[in-house]
Amino acid sequence: MTVAIYTAALDNRYGLGKVSSRIGLAMDAHIFNGSFNFVSHITQLKAQGRLDCVLIDEAQFLSKAQVRQLTDVVDNLHIPVLAFGLRTDFLGETFAGSQALLAWAD
């Protein structure tokens, strides 16, 4: 499968633009920040060839608008999106991206 992987620009624990598993597997990832447009970027990737799935790491750093964009990717571009991240911060407060994902995810 062809997967587009994204991670937050804030997360550089394993290197900027890297996603790593606990068992040591690592992959390059596209970086998103607050102004990143997922629909535009994923539409461009899809136009370049096959795209089966989108994976988002550090999804708690998504904005509410970006989560809405990802719902458009699923509903209009028919590409599944899998998002992974924290639900709350150390004070138990929900991240904006996590809150939107919990509200709109299927």
Image: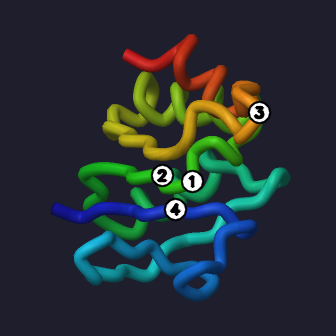
Q: How far apart are marks 1 and 3 (CA)?
A: 18 Å
Which quarter of the figure is the N terminus placed in? bottom left
1 or 3: tag closer to the N-terminus: 1
2 or 4: tag closer to the N-terminus: 4
SS of the residue under disc 2: strand
User: Looking at the image, which residue sits at the far bottom?
Assistant: 15
Locate residue 52 relative to residue 5 in the image: left or right.
left
Identify the residue at image location x=32%, y=71%. Answer: 21
Say above or below: 93 vs 22: above
The residue to which callout 4 is attached is 6
- Count neighbours of disc 4 (C-alpha within 10 A) and say few if under 14, some if 14 to 19, many if 20 or more: many
Name the kind of residue labelled 1 in the image. Answer: Glu
The residue to which callout 2 is attached is 56
SS of the residue under disc 3: loop
Identify the residue at image location x=60%, y=58%. Answer: 41
Do labels 2 and 1 touch, CB within 8 Å? yes
- Count neighbours of disc 3 (C-alpha within 10 A) and say few if under 14, some if 14 to 19, many if 20 or more: few
The residue to which callout 3 is attached is 91
Q: How far apart are marks 3 and 2 (CA)?
A: 24 Å
Identify the residue at image location x=55%, y=71%. Answer: 30
Looking at the rendered image, the disc whose residue lies closer to the viewer, 4 or 1, is: 1
Say above or below: 72 vs 63: above
